[in-house]
Amino acid sequence: MKANEQSFWQTYLSGMKLHVAIAHYTKVPPSWNEDDYVPDVNKLYWIEEGEGYLKVGDHKVLPKPGELCLLPADVRQSYGTTSDNTFGKYWCHFTAKVGSFNLFELLKTPITVRIQDSERVRESFKRLVHYHNSTEWTAAIHVQSAMLDLIAAFVEHADPITVQAPASGTMDKMNVVLAYIDEHLSESLTVDQLAQLVHFHPNYFIRLFKNTTGLSPIQYVNHKRMDKAKQLLAFTNKSVSAIAETLTMDAPYFSRLFKEYTALSPTDFRELALAGSEATVPNPS
């Protein structure tokens, strides 16, 4: 993946919106079966025991214990048992939106992946099930955390995985804009200027950009500038004022924006980064 495409996906996925509709552990009955239906949610299964089959499109698999299985939304699929030794599985139904798209419209993955660190997935599913059914006021945060960990585990182990453009031609145009933004963070950037790069009316460009990335053009530019600021604070001796100037901002606005993005002032972030780097230096004794 090219650097500007990787930058796009990092920012794109950071704006993902998740909703978990249901989460449980089930020992499925021998009658567990449905053919050729199209769900409007994604389904994730962690197989603990037993056997059965899953089919997505024309691809049929026989998952085994220790495998994480994904059945994406809006795709024809089937499932069923193959013996009385039925699946015992953790499972959930969820939606994952990036911009206006379903995540697994954009990421094409295998149906199953084998996870070496099975305890990681098991504990994430246990947390997901517990907090999805909890009345604790922090439950929603734990649900999001557990679900993100499960999605990350699946994607990290998926091979092959295909990342495709959100819509025909959109990625090419966005790559032009994103590459330009990366190369000109130290210059003033306007919506009109970015829209002209791809010959769009500014109003249409704003809608397209937000539908594609989940962020407005200005939010995206600020996001990238704050990423650049973190690098400069951690790895250079430039003053906060000099970094702000590098990013075409006055120092008070830069400091305020940086704190909005990181919950730390630039000075506090630098001190934390330096303390972390010093902690990794081995003791000479």
Image (cartoon, grey):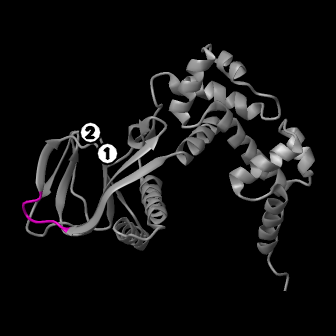
**Residue 45 appears in the figure:** no
Between 270 and 66, the residue placed more toward the observer is 270
Between the residue at mark 1 and the residue at mark 2, the CA separation in whole angstroms equals 6 Å
Q: Residue at x 21, y 68 (%)?
A: 26
- Give the residue type at disc 2: Val
Instruction: Read off the magenta span.
Output: 27-32
Which class describes the residues within 10 Å of circle 2: few (<14), some (14-19), or many (20+)? some
Taking the image as shown, residue 265 lies to the left or right of residue 141, namely: right
Taking the image as shown, residue 203 lies to the left or right of residue 98, namely: right
Taking the image as shown, residue 39 lies to the left or right of residue 241, namely: left
Residue 154 colored in magenta in the image: no
Position of 35 relative to 85 (above/below) = above
Q: Which residue is mark 1?
A: 72
**Picture quadrant where residue 213 is located:** top right
Position of 233 relative to 199 (above/below) = below
Q: Quadrant of the N terminus?
A: top right
Q: Are the two marked residues, 1 and 2, in contact with CB atoms closer than 8 angstroms? A: yes
Q: Residue at x 72, y 34 (%)?
A: 182
Q: Which residue is mark 2?
A: 75
**Picture quadrant where residue 7 is located:** top right
**Residue 119 appears in the figure:** yes
Mainly helix, strand or loop, the magenta region? loop
Position of 176 relative to 92 (above/below) = above
The local secondary structure at tag 1 comes to loop
x then y, percent, for residue 142 = 47, 66
x then y, percent, for residue 159 = 41, 50
- Give the residue type at disc 1: Pro
**Picture quadrant where residue 106 is located:** top left
Which class describes the residues within 10 Å of circle 1: few (<14), some (14-19), or many (20+)? many
Between 79 and 260, the residue placed more toward the observer is 260
